[in-house]
Image (cartoon, rainbow, N blue to C red):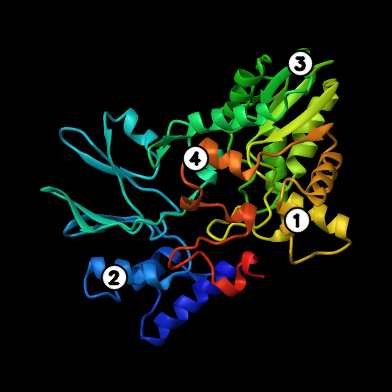
Amino acid sequence: MALLIMLLFLAKGLLDKGCSFTEVSKDTVNTTELIAKLITQGNDIVDGIEKMFAAIDGSCSLLLLHKDGLYAARDRLGYTTLTIGKNENSIAVTSETCAFVNNDLKIDKYLQPGEIVLIAEDGLQQKRAGGKESQVCAFLWIYTGFPASNYEGINTEVVRERCGRFLARRDKDLDVDIVSGVPDSGIAHAIGYAMESGKPYRRPLVKYTPGYGRSYTPPTQETRDLVAKMKLISIEEIINGQKIIVCEDSIVRGTQLKNFTVKKLLDSGAKEIHVRPACPPLMFPCKYNLSTRSINELSARKAIKSIEGSDIEDVSEYTDHTSEKYKKMVDWIAKDIEVNSVKYQTVDDMVSAIGLEKEKLCLYCWTGKCPTSEGACCKKSSCAASK
């Protein structure tokens, strides 16, 4: 809803200036055309991109084909990433550095937040220097990024292994037989857990086909459930009678984990199931992406509502992993998804696993605190941390 309101607000401002739109759908406008119209308000391309950055409340990294060449611009907070790759004959730009490897390209430059470059026949030209402040999305390393990709010079697979190691260090007294990860993004977390704990890594759950898509992104619960049901197959010979650690990138709604992952393990005879998400409880829907659209969808918020008897505005006690209310929330989630235990990653351990300074990461979906640099992700009056 917030995204829709912002789009309508920006579109109205342009319509009032005499602009028109060629495509309108679902009571809004095409976002690509909207960005293009915003850029045309500038004196030139660079000025237009800067004006677009200033106009939007959010993140927009882009590639723009122009008669001058190809412009690449990273959003002003660096929430998303863009990287330049080169070889002897070519220059390329991508958000995922894994695209370079099989094309014989080497990483040449990570664009800085707000930086604008032009790729032309005579090479790479910087048109606007980047800023020093950054709020890159921490979830890139935990879940959304590709394992072979680097962001800010830090490899995703290596971070996930470190996340698993941190989880294992907080489980020194837990007696289990095997360590597993929910394919695909949970696998590296599980490998790290197994390396740190010394417990064997095994695959009680495998993907039906490697190409099956992510199950948390479709717009309807019905589609999400169908993908979750079909993409994983359990192996009873590995599961039966075992006490199992299940490493997962995150718990968003909790429904798929309960109804399709945990149920398959229980139906195959698992003796105990201990779920270890690689990030803290998700408390706030992301203001940039569309994967979670409302607070009420989130598993942690369902737990809080059940404990408190109603929705509450101040959830600071529930974001503090040392508090009694946090413990009650986690116990509620474990009971709800029908497992023996749940233990989340802490914010500090997750930040340490990534390896960037805390102030350079966007942690909004876990903490409710907006980026603090100029042009923050949300207006201060609507930031959860300001209430």
Q: Which mark is residue 48?
A: 2
Separation (CA) of disc 2 from disc 4: 29 Å
User: Would you name the residue on which mark 3 appears?
Assistant: 177
Q: Are marks 2 and 1 in contact (CB under 8 Å)?
A: no
| Visible residue check, residue 310 | yes
| Helix, strand or loop for disc 3 | loop
Q: Earlier in the sequence, mark 3 or mark 1?
A: 3
Q: Identity of the amino acid at label 2?
A: Gly
Q: N-terminal of the two: label 2 or label 1?
A: 2
Q: Earlier in the sequence, mark 2 or mark 4?
A: 2
- Quadrant, the C terminus: bottom right
Indicate the position of residue 215 as horizontal and vertical percent values.
Answer: 64, 42
Disc 4: which residue: 145
Look at the numbered disc 2 and give the secondary structure of its residue.
helix
326 versus 371 height, above or below: above
- Secondary structure beneath dot 4 equals loop
At a point 77% along the width and 44% down the height, the residue shown is 255
* Dot placed on the residue nearer the N-terminal end, 2 or 3: 2
Kindly identify which residue carries mark 1: 317
* Residue contact at pointers 3 and 1, CB within 8 angstroms: no
Q: CA distance from mark 1 to mark 4?
A: 30 Å
Q: Nearer the viewer, mark 2 or mark 3?
A: 3
Label 1: which secondary element: helix
- Whether residue 27 appears in this view of the structure is no
Residue lying at 46% horizontally and 51% vertically, measured from the top left: 360
Against 222, is 170 above or below? above
